[in-house]
Amino acid sequence: MIIMCLAIPAKIIEIHGDDAKVDFGEGVLREVNISLVNANTDEYVLVHAGYAIQVIDEKEAQETLKLWTEILEMENPTA
Amino acid sequence: MVNFRSPELAKQVAGHLKGIAPKFPVKFCHVCGTHEWTVTHFGLRSVLPEMVEVVAGPGCPVCVLPAAEIDEAVKLALEGVTVATFGDVLRVPGSSLSLAEARSRGGDVRIVYGIHDAVKMAIEEPEREFVFFSIGFETTAPLTASEILKGPPDNLSFLISHRLIPPAMELLLGIGDLHIDGFIAPGHVSTIIGLKSYEIFPSAYNMPVVVAGFEPLDILFAIDMLLQQINNGVAKLENEYNRVVKPEGNEKALRHIQQVFNVVDGRWRGLGRLPLSAFALKSKFEKWDSRKKHKIKVGVGRDILPGCQCHLIMIGKINPIDCPLYMSICTPESPKGPCMVSIEGSCRIWSKHGIDTHKT
Ligand code: SF4
């Protein structure tokens, strides 16, 4: 069942035109429309109701976690 | 893929939150059913400092649909039009019937995963008349806009019931006794609209806003950022979810929205009419507008059944457990209000997690 605000990450396996085959993990494959994003194979996209709505920036994700880990270690050295 | 669920890191953030929590109570409001799910499912309220409360605003798109708009879909279904929509809408009460009840009375109501399924059905069954009941916030609206721009088949029209989140956030700030100290803004709505629409909150209301993702760490980081703003005496718009949300949003999706929809006043269930809070099809596309094509006329509708407190749940004024009907007369099996029907409704989420005490 679709949760309306929810978008689920999926990896692009192959692209044909406006559509792409994506992998939601654990072998769940689906065709989704990727016409609203500029995505390449092997990138992760957020899928909402059959459409990719954004590409997930993996580098930015790593940066965010790294930054928080640093902040927390600095302010909370014993934790 | 990078994971935002590390329990070790979550514990560290929780420790940090305790260290920076103010001595006075603060209340943060999110406006997204999926945020409520994350907060509840991962028991985040139980790791927050005593003084920090997180409440749910009107973030469940199915819950905020006024009964009158369900009535429109029900009327069409009973008149022999096939109504295609998302599964979560089916059991939401209209003034007298839900779509599920219309179906048991012979109406053709079909559940689809997305709008493309409705387009496919209409192409495959050209002799039938189809309506796609298009609901959801800014995340869902561009998908409908894109299909309309492609020129859908003539036997398909659209019952547009989209709503916009920033006007609902603004409504909350006008309710004097809610005392919200900061917003956790919805990541996927923001994926489409970007950051600009939230600027009004820090600038006109001195209200901190942090756009957040949907993993437990996202929410904890966002709360940390809000607390830091409060401690520093500032109100800013910040983006915790920058791996997905760009300041400009999804420009192509926004362009499609602007091409297809006008922003109009919209009614919200139990909350009344909010200025500039809904989308309506531009007249250029009126041949696909179900309201014009099928000349639907319904009354004002009855939004809240006697005893149901959904209108207070949806503004974060009370919690589900404060409703006397919660889990007594009103259960997921026999829901009395939309907040118990929708999987994004607070009552439903709390009940599915077996919550009957105050802190989760
Ligand atoms: S528990 Fe049921 S009756 Fe009470 S507010 Fe929630 S949906 Fe309405």
Image (cartoon, coloured by chain):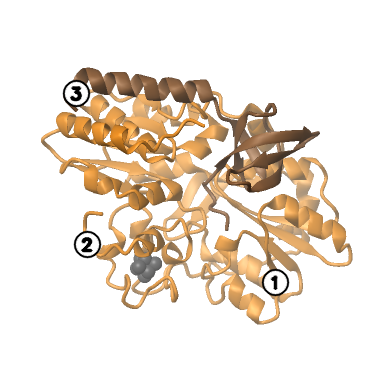
B8 or B182, which lies in front? B8
Q: Are marks 2 and 1 in contact (CB under 8 Å)?
A: no
In the image, is the residue at mark 2 within 8 Å of ligand 1 by its beta carbon? no
**Numbered disc 1: secondary structure:** helix
Question: Label 3 lies in what chain?
Answer: A
Q: Please determine whether, in this image, residue B214 is positioned above or below residue B160.
A: above
Q: Amino acid at mark 1?
A: Ala
Q: Is residue A19 visible?
A: yes
Ligand number 1: quarter of image: bottom left
* 2 or 1: tag closer to the N-terminus: 1
Q: Which mark is residue B77?
A: 1
Chain B: its colour in the image is orange
| Residue B359 coordinates in the image, percent (x, y) | 22, 54
Q: Amino acid at mark 2?
A: Thr
CA–CA distance between discs 3 and 1?
A: 60 Å
Q: Amino acid at mark 3?
A: Asn
- Foreground mark, 2 or 1, reads 2
Tell me the residue at 55%/61% (across/down): B88
| Residue B173 coordinates in the image, percent (x, y) | 33, 41
Question: Label 2 lies in what chain?
Answer: B
Question: In the image, is B91 to the left or to the right of B238?
Answer: right
Chain A: its colour in the image is brown
Q: Is residue B176 visible?
A: no
Q: Which mark is residue A76?
A: 3
Q: Which residue is the site of mark 2?
A: B357
Question: Label 1 lies in what chain?
Answer: B
